[in-house]
Each structure stands twice: as structure tokens, then as C-alpha cells.
Image (cartoon, rainbow, N blue to C red):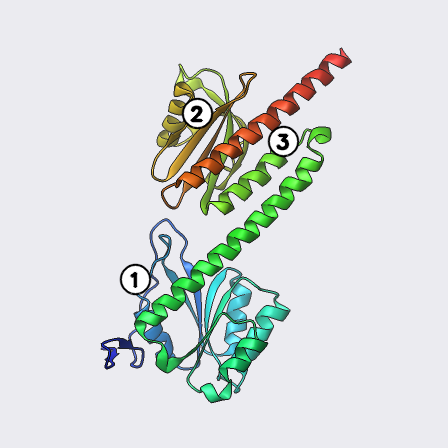
Amino acid sequence: MSQFEMDSDGDDKLQFAAEPTGNVCVPGLVPWKLLLVDDEKVVHSVTRLALEGFELAGRGLEFISAYSAAEARQALAQHDDIALILLDVVMETDHAGLDLVHYIRRELNNKFVRIVLRTGQPGQAPELEVITQYDINDYKEKTELTRQKLFSTVYTSLCSYRDLIALECNRLGLLKVIEASAHIFERRNMAAFAEGVLQQLTALLYLNKDAMLVQPCGVLARPSSDKLNILVATGCYSDFTGAVDVSQFEREVADRIAATIEQRSSNYGDNYWVSYYVTESGMEQLLYVSAKDVFSVPDIAMIELFVKNVAIAHETIALLESNAHDQHQ
């Protein structure tokens, strides 16, 4: 049986041992990976207990424990998506934690994982020196880490990690768009262009990677035989390409798409958006995306702009291809 010691302010001090708790995960969403690196087992136990019930953007925590810097290196080799490291300074050596930071930032070149140093011997590594010479994100003495402060530290660190990953995905998506758009007309590479922009959009909006850009083929009078032309898709829809029967999608998804095309207007709910756009020549296009949270007004504006731009680009390519075909006849 374990407990927290109450200080004079009524806050919870992280000092006594606790029984290890299971991972805190919200069903359906991948938890944030948190690496605990400390040579004292009690620190692992208490940290797990203190963060029980933690959640950010519907995602809980997956705890990974390492009791030395060497074990931490093994964990980093096995998991390339660790979001946060709570790292002790003094372990095998007085500077084992700092050496590990150097390994992560310089040798692994991992600039994304957030690193919070925790030390019970602040004299071994002065705070000012550590902050100025090492790429860490926070520095805490173990005696000052109350349960509330630990929650706050983890929350802000994970928010920073999420933003950095989104920016990186956006950068990669933008590079893909630039590369594809440079040759889009000569190669007719609309799929690569749309894929890049779709990646950029999902990163910017913190969306799930379940999205598809669709061009209707046929009439929705007979749902069982209707076809959709999937231009590009990600996530659980990535296997759908080309002409796809509506019935192959989940009933709920198929109904949303069918309603959008039938009404010729965008359709949305709390966690999905079906954006509809028709060009001047009558070419229809829609984008189906799912989100972790409710869409905001800026989110909707970005989605609509995406669909409009891609539809116009696709129409232009179709016109060029048509003209080229006529010239060869």
C-alpha cells in the first residue's frame, strides 16, 4: 500500500513508493510514449501512480521504464516514437543522464522527443550550466516535483512534441507538394500532388490519417452499384484506389458521402467532415476526413480551400489531357 506525503500547502509530494500501475490508454487512440529513466525503482512507481488518468487529446500514456542510461539506449532503439523522457541525471555515473542527452540529440539526431531532467543531487549538475549547454526542455529537482507540477510538466511537454511532429509532417508534405507541382503538368501527376497536400492538411489540423479525396463516378440513385473515383487516400482508406464501389465502405461513411453528393453541399459532424466542391465545368470533388476533436471554423476554411485548389488543378490537367488527345487525332 502506498501513499503521497502531503506538504504544508496541501499538495502531493512524490516521495513514497507505489505499486506499479498499468498503462493509461483511451480505446482507439495510440497513447503517448513516456520513457522513465531512473536507477531508483520507487521513482518509477510513484511517477506512474502520479500520472494515472493522464490524458491529452484523447490519448493516455504508455510507460517505458529504463533503470540506467544503457537500458534507455536500448529502449530508444526499440521505440522511435517516444514523445517524452523523464531523465535522472546521476545513475551509473554522475553525468550518465547528461551523456544520454548528448547521445539522443547528437548521435541519434532526435530533435523531437522532449527531455525533462530530474535530479535529486542538483549540485552534481548546476541548472544554469545544464540549460545553456544541453538541449533539454526542462530541469526539475525531484523534491520540487509535486503531483500537480508533474502533470503540468508532462502536459506542456507533450503539447510541444505534438506541435513539432505536426510541423515536421507539414514540412514533408509541403516538400512533396513542391516536388510534384513542379512537374504536375508535364507528368500529369495529380495523385502525387493531392497526396502531398492531403498529408500537409492532416498534419496542420492534427487529424487522424484516415482521409480520402474523391471524385464521384455515376449517380447515387442505386447505392449498391455506385462508383467513386478515389484520387488519393490515407490511413484506413489507403487500400482504396481508382473506381471503388460505395458498398465497400462502412455504412456510416458511405451514407455521409452519398448524402453529400446528393445534396451537392458539404456535410459534417463532430469528428468528420465531407467537403464538396464543383468546378465551373461541372467537375465534382469531395474530401472525407476524420478528426480527433470537433472541427473549428479555421479548420473548415482550410479543408474547403484544399478541396477547391485540388479540384481546380485536377480540372486544368484534365483539360490539357483532353487538348493533347484532340491534337493527336
As helix, strand or loop, the secondary structure at mark 3 comes to helix
- What residue appears at the point 48 percent right and 21 percent down from the top-left corner? 227
Of all residues shown, which one is farthest toward the right? 328
* Tag 1: amino acid: Gly
Number of the label disc, if any, that sits on residue 246:
2
Give the crowd class for mark 2: few <14, some 14-19, many >=20 residues within 10 Å.
many
Q: Nearer the viewer, mark 1 or mark 2?
A: 1
- Residue 216: give x, y in percent of width and height: 49, 22
Q: Determine which of the numbered discs, if any, sits on residue 70 in the image.
A: none
Alpha carbon of mark 3 to alpha carbon of mark 2: how far? 22 Å
Identify the secondary structure beneath mark 2: helix
Disc 1 from disc 3: Cα separation: 45 Å
Label at residue 190: 3
Report if the CB atoms under discs 1 and 2 are less than 8 Å apart: no
Find the residue positioned furthest to the top.
Answer: 329
Tell which circle, 1 or 2, labels the residue nearer the N-terminal end: 1
Quadrant where the C terminus lies?
top right
Which residue is pictured at 67% across the width and 38% down the height? 180
| Residue 292, above or below 21 | above
Residue marked by disc 1:
53
- The kind of residue on which mark 2 rests is Val
Q: Determine whether the residue tagged by mark 1 lies in a helix, strand or loop.
A: loop
Mark 1 → mark 2, Cα distance in angstroms:
40 Å
> Callout 3: few (<14), some (14-19), or many (20+) C-alpha neighbours within 10 Å?
many
Quadrant in the picture for the N terminus: bottom left
Residue at horizontal 55%, vertical 43%? 200
